[in-house]
Amino acid sequence: MELRLLRYFLAVARENSFTRAAHYLHVTQPTLSRQMMDLEEELGQKLLNRETHHITLTPEGMLLRRRAEEIMALVQKTEAEFNAIGENVSGDVYIGGGESKAMDLVADAISELHEDYPGICWHLYTGVAGDVMERLDNGLLDFGVLLQPVDIASYDSIALPVKDAWGVLMRRDNPLAEKESVTPEDLWKLPLICSRRDLRNKAVRNPYAEWFGDDLDKLNIAAVHNLIYNASLLVERGLGCALTLEHRNNIAGDKLCFRPLNPMLESGSCIVWKKYQVFSKAAEVFRERLVEKFAGVL
């Protein structure tokens, strides 16, 4: 499968039109249509629904679009790494992580390195642990900041000297807002909004499993999220209470409030990278700074 065909396919998927995609790619429409038919024949799957004046993706087409985007991102990353080879430390470093206190420490390390190596461009990706691990495994990230508990046996890692406290984000008119902390019994029958890490990847263990006890499956899950700000909009509208980390940026605002869990539940964090990873010079400088700052510090 040629990269050129993937670029053509992504253009068709984006434009939903052979005419517009052909114009963007500077090729003729018959040429583009024929190339897409060749791609479908090569893969043995129908990728496009060809409707009058409109193109849509089949389920197989949506799968290819996702993989093609990952492939092209990896190609661009690889090209950038080779372009940065030389005496000067420059280029791109890709870091993924959730919304936790650990990112403060990562931001400190980035800020320090920026003084010495202003030619490095930092790319930050925000997502839950499962998303970050998938992008690490696919080569789209150099480093991942993961909230424990999570299976990191397939990565090299450094534990970060910080912990995040779990609690509940709720409306101020919620009766639970009158309490200083929230117990499992307070939450059994309430609609809850949880992070996607709690429900998906088997390598990412549920931080609430022991706290809630054996009846975790009986929780009333009203919604899931991967960014707490967006979840807070649902809390404001009364959809439920969000199980989340305590945030220093006052996500609660005037309408919402945060109450910690009782008994207290805390999660540590670590920064990880693929074993035997061959880093660009810029990424290696960052890894060395992480080891210098945090290796052996707990």
Image (cartoon, grey):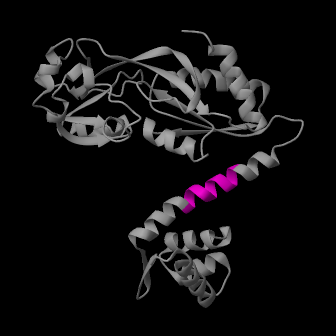
Is 294 on the left or on the right of 207, as rendered? Answer: right
Quarter of the figure with residue 174: top left
The rendered magenta stretch, by its main secondary structure, is classed as helix
Is 64 on the left or on the right of 190, as rendered? Answer: right
Residue 48 place in picture, x, y as percent? 45, 78
- Quadrant position of the N terminus in the picture: bottom right
Does 181 sit above or below residue 249? Answer: above
Q: Which residues are magenta?
A: 68-77
Q: Name the residue nearer the viewer: 217 or 31.
A: 217
Does 145 sit above or below residue 60? Answer: above
Does 182 sit above or below residue 78? Answer: above
User: Farthest right residue?
Assistant: 87
Is 214 on the left or on the right of 228, as rendered? Answer: left
* Residue depicted at 18% across the width and 25% down the height: 214
* Residue depicted at 27% across the width and 26% down the height: 254
Number of marks in picture: 0
Residue 188 place in picture, x, y as percent? 12, 28
Quarter of the figure with residue 156: top right
- Quadrant position of the C terminus in the picture: top right
**Residue 215 part of the magenta segment:** no
Residue 116 place in picture, x, y as percent? 79, 25
Say if residue 23 shows up in the picture: yes
**Residue 69 part of the magenta segment:** yes
* Residue depicted at 45% across the width and 63% down the height: 63
Residue 109 place in picture, x, y as percent? 65, 22
Say if residue 168 shows up in the picture: no
User: Farthest front residue?
Assistant: 153
